[in-house]
Image: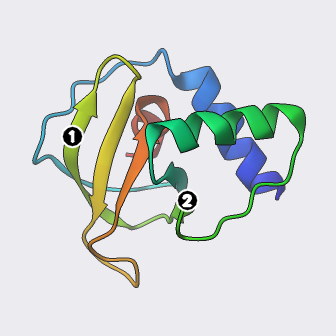
Amino acid sequence: MRLIIMLLLSSILLVGCDSDYKVGDKITLKESIMGSHTIHDFKEMIKKARKGDKISVDGVNYNILFEDSKIKVVKVSEKDNMILVKLLNGSDEGTEWWVSKGDLNRAK
């Protein structure tokens, strides 16, 4: 639980960090990051973390993209500072998750 909160709060702090991502970019994560099914879900997850509420990593609405995961950029939302990525390996291969740019900058 503490890991999840730490990851979420770091995404808030690093959201201002900028890096240019393009559709099709492939990245191997050097650190685990949180992802969500939608941008709205990600924002709700941040709100819950700020309030200290429990966040259920269910693999449906929220998921952890683990260190050494290979991902591909599918879509970039400059407005929300979010990136839709597709997992290219592991048990969740093929699933897509919205992650914050700040988290991705830190984890690549």
Residue pointed to by mark 1: 75
Q: Measuring 37% from the left and 46% from the top, which residue is drawn there? A: 108
Res. 63 mark: none
Q: CA distance from mark 1 to mark 2?
A: 18 Å
User: What is the basis of the colouring in this image?
Assistant: rainbow
Answer above or below: position of 37 versus 105. Answer: below
Kindly indicate the quadrant of the structure image that contains residue 43.
top right
x and y, in percent, of residue 9 in the image: 70, 33
Amino acid beneath label 1 = Lys
User: Left or right of 14: which side holds 53?
Assistant: right
Q: Quick one: SS at disc 1?
A: strand
Q: Earlier in the sequence, mark 1 or mark 2?
A: 2
Query: Within the image, what quadrant is residue 77 found in?
Result: top left
Q: Residue furthest right?
A: 52
Quadrant including the N terminus: bottom right
**Where in the figure is residue 101, as x and y percent of width and height?**
40, 31
| Residue at far bottom of view | 91
Instruction: Residue 88: give x, y in percent of width and height.
Output: 24, 70
- The image shows residue 91, relative to residue 69, as above or below, that is below
Say left or right for 30 vs 85: right
Bin the neighbour count of mark 2 within 10 Å (Cα to Cα): few under 14, some 14-19, many 20 and up.
some
The residue under the point 33% across, 38% down is 83
Residue nearest the observer in this picture, 19 or 77 = 77
* Residue with the most extreme left position: 24
- Residue at the location (65% across, 33% down)? 10
The percent coordinates of residue 84 (x first, y second) are: 31, 45
Q: Amino acid at mark 2?
A: Asn
Q: Are marks 1 and 2 in contact (CB under 8 Å)?
A: no
Rendered position, 17 above or below 85: above
Query: Which residue matches tag 2?
Result: 61
Left of 71 or right of it: where is 107? right
